[in-house]
């Protein structure tokens, strides 16, 4: 049976999903109905930037995928690198975020085929959000996230890594946006995660990734 690691931060982890499934669990259920069962490993850790994810991702994937052949890695860059702090200072300068994204994506591709996901939209009226991990206020805005997603996509085109622009796909999704509004504005709720899983499951990138 195919095994897939899902690497990322809080959105991958499923923060805000009252049914505790998150994207990996919901995608696995959708695919099971299509007769495409797979084992999913949720390796999302809330609050982490790409630099922090990079410290653990390769070893965690290797521990779960080993020497198997029918494997894959879904790598979600998340939104944390594009947060701004008080004074409008970026948490991670964009050029550094793109460099770290490229480096980690290439390292993960040495382990298994990679499908990259971009950051998701936010509800700006609910910003800023307080991080319980750092006790800091983080500001997110959709223009910065859209620009960041474009930058990640550019990297993936150069490196021939399949990429799904979740920002563009979800920015007009009633279910996802309603879920943001009903939650903290950064993470959607159960119906929002279900909408994300549906968008992913019907994408050509996911279906090509499945066949690799």
Image (cartoon, rainbow, N blue to C red):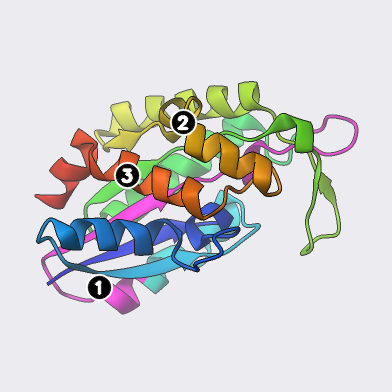
Element under label 2? loop
> Which secondary structure lies at badge 3?
helix
Q: Pinpoint residue 170: horizontal percent, then vertical percent.
A: 46, 32
Q: Disc 3 to disc 1, how far (Cα)?
A: 25 Å
The percent coordinates of residue 95 (x first, y second) are 58, 30
Residue 55 on image: x %, y %: 53, 64
User: Distance between the Cα atoms at labels 2 and 3?
Assistant: 11 Å
Q: Is residue 39 left or right of residue 144?
A: left
Q: Which of disc 3 and disc 2 is earlier in sequence?
A: 2
Residue at position x 69%, y 28% in the image: 141
Quadrant (top left/top right/bottom left/bottom right) for the N terminus: bottom left
Q: Residue at position x 9%, y 61% from top?
A: 35
Does the magenta-highlighted stretch encompass residue 36? no
Q: Which residue is mark 2?
A: 173
Q: Which residue is mark 3?
A: 198
Compared to residue 144, the image places residue 114 above or below, namely below
Tell me the number on the disc at residue 65: 1
The local secondary structure at tag 1 comes to helix
Task: Calculate the distance from the C-alpha at mark 2 to the C-alpha at mark 1.
Answer: 34 Å
Q: Position of residue 136 (x, y in %)?
A: 85, 52
Residue extent of the magenta highlight: 61-89
Label 3: how many Cα within 10 Å (few below 14, some 14–19, many 20+): some
For discs 2 and 1, the disc positioned in front in the rendered view:
2
Please, is residue 146 above or below residue 181 in the view? Answer: above
For the residue pair 148 and 58, the one nearer the viewer reads as 148
């Amino acid at each position: 049976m195919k095994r897939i690691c899902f690497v990322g931060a809080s959105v991958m982890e499923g923060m805000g999903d009252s049914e505790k499934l998150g994207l990996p669990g919901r995608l696995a259920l959708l695919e099971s109905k299509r007769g495409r069962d797979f084992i999913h490993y949720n390796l999302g850790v809330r609050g982490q930037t790409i630099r922090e994810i990079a410290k653990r991702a390769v070893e965690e994937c290797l521990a779960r995928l080993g020497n198997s052949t029918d494997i894959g890695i879904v790598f979600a860059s998340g939104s944390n690198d594009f947060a701004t702090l008080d004074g409008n200072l970026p948490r991670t300068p964009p050029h550094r975020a793109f460099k770290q994204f490229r480096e980690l994506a290439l390292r993960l591709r040495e382990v298994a085929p990679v499908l990259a996901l971009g950051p998701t939209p936010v509800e700006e009226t609910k910003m800023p959000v307080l991080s319980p991990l750092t006790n800091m206020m983080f500001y997110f805005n959709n223009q910065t996230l859209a620009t960041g997603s474009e930058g990640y996509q550019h990297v993936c085109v150069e490196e021939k890594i399949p990429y799904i622009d979740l920002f563009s796909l979800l920015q007009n999704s009633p279910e996802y946006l309603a879920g943001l509004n009903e939650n903290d504005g950064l993470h959607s709720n159960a119906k929002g995660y279900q909408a994300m899983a549906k968008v992913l499951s019907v994408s050509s990138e996911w279906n090509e990734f499945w066949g690799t």
